[in-house]
Amino acid sequence: MNTVIAFVLIFGALVFFHELGHLLLAKRAGILCREFAIGFGPKILSFKKNETIYTIRLLPIGGFVRMAGEDPEMIEVKPGYHVGLLPGKDGKIEKIIINNKEKYPEARIVEVEKADLEHGMFITGFEEGEEEALQRFEISEHSFFIMDGQEVQIAPYNRQFASKTLGQRAAAIFAGPFMNFILAFVVLFFLGLFQGSPVDEPKLGELTKNGTAIHSGLKEGDVVESINGKTVSSWKDVVDIIRSSPDKELSFKINRSGKDLSVKVVPESFKAGDQTIGRIGAYNPVEKGFFTAVKYGATETFNVTKEIILGLGKLITGQFSIKMLSGPVGIYDVTDKVAQSGIENLFRWAAMLSINLGIVNLLPLPALDGGRLLFFAVEAVRGRPIDRQKEGMVHFIGFALLMLLMLVVTWNDIQRLFLLK
């Protein structure tokens, strides 16, 4: 149960901050955001604040921000329709009633002759009882359809995604993955702030209770000067020698409070994948401080990003098999193991997943944020956007292929974790 909670919280946080990036930049550009959703499928919780409906949906496999103009409007007003019109205090129409008009006796019933609810924001038509006089009704910029008793805000063209500049649209899309990098940095920053930031010095940090280091007489704070006569100048040097010497006696020359001492230590052997390495139960030294934590957060975010990109490069070149990819099932299994190793490692794992989500979404593949940014780049070169229907078809096909890949990866996870055990 703890693993389930940890998985849901981590995955939910990654999706939340990703979609929050889209939402904030879209709203800043003046785009009408109809819905901010975590998950897909049926709604299990929803509330409305200002113009946006915030929802949590049943399937926790992603999220979305529904921006006006990205999808065809579901409600249209065409010539010949009979609609009810309710004016606001300024005389402009604030509500257009599509059906069940009898529930609104104060509404003015109009047979539509022409409607422009994007650019001109008007309806012309004949009001009941005055069929001979064609009238023009101005529509408010903040108006609503009422259909089946539900209000749906009308989106003038200047509130739609496509009306914004190329830079504004690109920023709204890029903000999602960018927020994942920001989230990872913040998590790692706080780890560095409270746990301390590792420093590359040949100095012993905290010692484990049952490690060979503490049993051999080493103490936290000892400065390692040499091992078996080999001078060491960094924590990496110390680790490399220990890892390569399982069950072999090592002579540590240390400096403790200004005194030089010699200590014999035998690293215990430890199985790490296909290798047997040595360890003595000593952590590297740490420093605490605001600016040290900032540096640690930025450095670790960069290093993890680099490693993931190199891994993707191996996948493209064939050095990395698709069978080694993990989907939700595999991620859940790793989360279970990491959760058992401590809260600190769980936060590090969350930061790595956040970076991974950001990088994957920036890949120039249809249906991903990177695919949309690629279309924007083409638009910048051409000087005009690609036909929306063609772009939509490309994204639809890309989404279908991604779902197929997800099924393959999930099946591989199930085989690896259950069927092959």
Image (spheres, grey):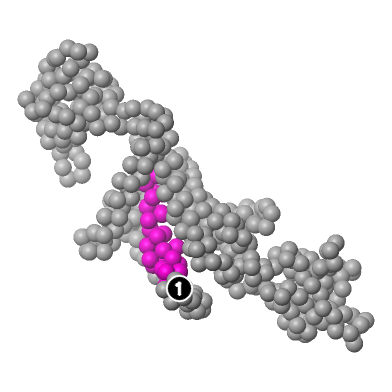
Question: Is residue 222 rendered to the left or right of residue 403?
Answer: left
Q: Residue at x 13, y 33 (%)?
A: 241
Residue 373: say if magenta: yes
Please say if 136 is above or below 399: below
User: Who's the residue at 54% across and 52% down the image?
Assistant: 20
Give the residue pinned by disc 1.
379
Q: Is residue 128 left or right of residue 289?
A: right
Task: Kindly tell me whether residue 201 is visible in this rendering.
Answer: yes
Disc 1 crowd, CA 10 A, few/some/many (<14, 14-19, 20+):
some
Rendering coords of residue 62 (x, y %): 49, 57
Return the residue nearer the eye: 35 or 132: 132
Residue visible at 89% across and 68% down in the picture: 106
Say if the magenta span includes residue 355: yes
Residue 50, how many percent across, how many down?
Answer: 69, 54
The amino acid type, in three-letter code, at marker 1 is: Glu
Residue range in magenta is: 350-378
Res. 8 visible in picture: no
Q: Between 76 and 323, which is closer to the camera in this rendering?
A: 76
The overriding secondary structure of the stretch rendered in magenta is helix
Point out the residue furthest to the bottom here: 132
Task: Please tell me in which quadrant of the rendered image residue 84 appears.
Answer: bottom right
Does 124 appear above or below 298? below
Which type of secondary structure does the marked residue at label 1 adopt?
helix
Foreground: 332 or 316?
A: 316
Residue 334 is situated, as x and y percent measured from the top left of the image, at 35, 46
Query: Number of labelled discs?
Result: 1
